[in-house]
């Protein structure tokens, strides 16, 4: 992707974290490297057993983008 003349690799990057809290219908993940927390619905967790506080998780995440066509238009002009 090209944004303002700079090529940006917006590929999914692997992250890891630890489950810090499990509530009714959601769980909280403390992302490694002090990157913050994620609150996610329980149905988004893929597992074969019931998750517990302290379990390690891994996930893929790319950069967050504003939904705007100007970036895509810029790339198309090349």
Image (tube, helix red, strand yellow):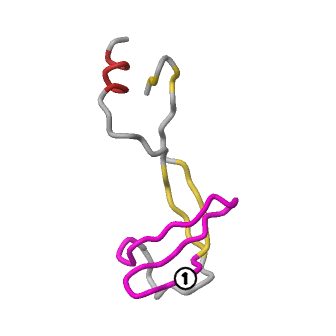
Q: Nearer the viewer, residue 56 or 20?
A: 20
Residue 11 versus residue 14 in the image, above or below:
above
Residue furthest right in the image: 33
Percent x, y for residue 33?
70, 59
Residue 65 picture quarter: top left
**In the displayed structure image, the side of residue 73 where residue 13 appears, left or right:** right
Magenta stretch: residue 27 in it?
Answer: yes
Magenta residues (range): 19-44
Q: Position of residue 28 (x, y in %)?
A: 52, 75
Res 47 quadrant in image:
bottom left
Residue at (52% x, 21% y) in the render? 6
Say whether residue 8 is left or right of residue 65.
right
Front residue of this view, candidates 51 and 40? 40
| Principal secondary structure, stretch drawn in magenta | strand
Residue 46 image position (x, y, % from top left): 42, 73
Residue at left offset 60%, top offset 62%: 36
Side of 30 relative to 66 (left or right): right
- The residue where tag 1 is placed is 21
Which image quadrant: the N terminus? Answer: top left
Identity of the residue drawn at 32% across and 17% down: 76
Q: Quadrant of the C terminus?
A: top left
Question: Toward the viewer: 51 or 26?
Answer: 26
Q: State the image quarter where residue 41 is shown.
A: bottom left
Residue 29 percent coordinates (x, y) = 55, 71
Residue density around tag 1, few if under 14, some if 14–19, many if 20 or more, within 10 Å: some
Classify mark 1: helix, strand or loop.
Answer: strand
Is 41 contained in the magenta span? yes
Residue 13, compared with residue 38, is above or below; it is: above
């Amino acid at each position: 992707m090209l944004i303002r003349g700079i090529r940006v690799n917006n590929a999914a990057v692997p992250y890891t974290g630890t489950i810090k809290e499990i509530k009714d219908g959601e769980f909280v993940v403390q992302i490694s490297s002090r990157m913050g927390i994620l609150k996610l619905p329980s149905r988004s967790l893929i597992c074969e057993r019931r998750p517990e506080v302290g379990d390690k998780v891994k996930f893929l995440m790319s950069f967050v983008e504003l939904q705007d066509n100007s970036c895509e238009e810029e790339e198309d002009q090349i």
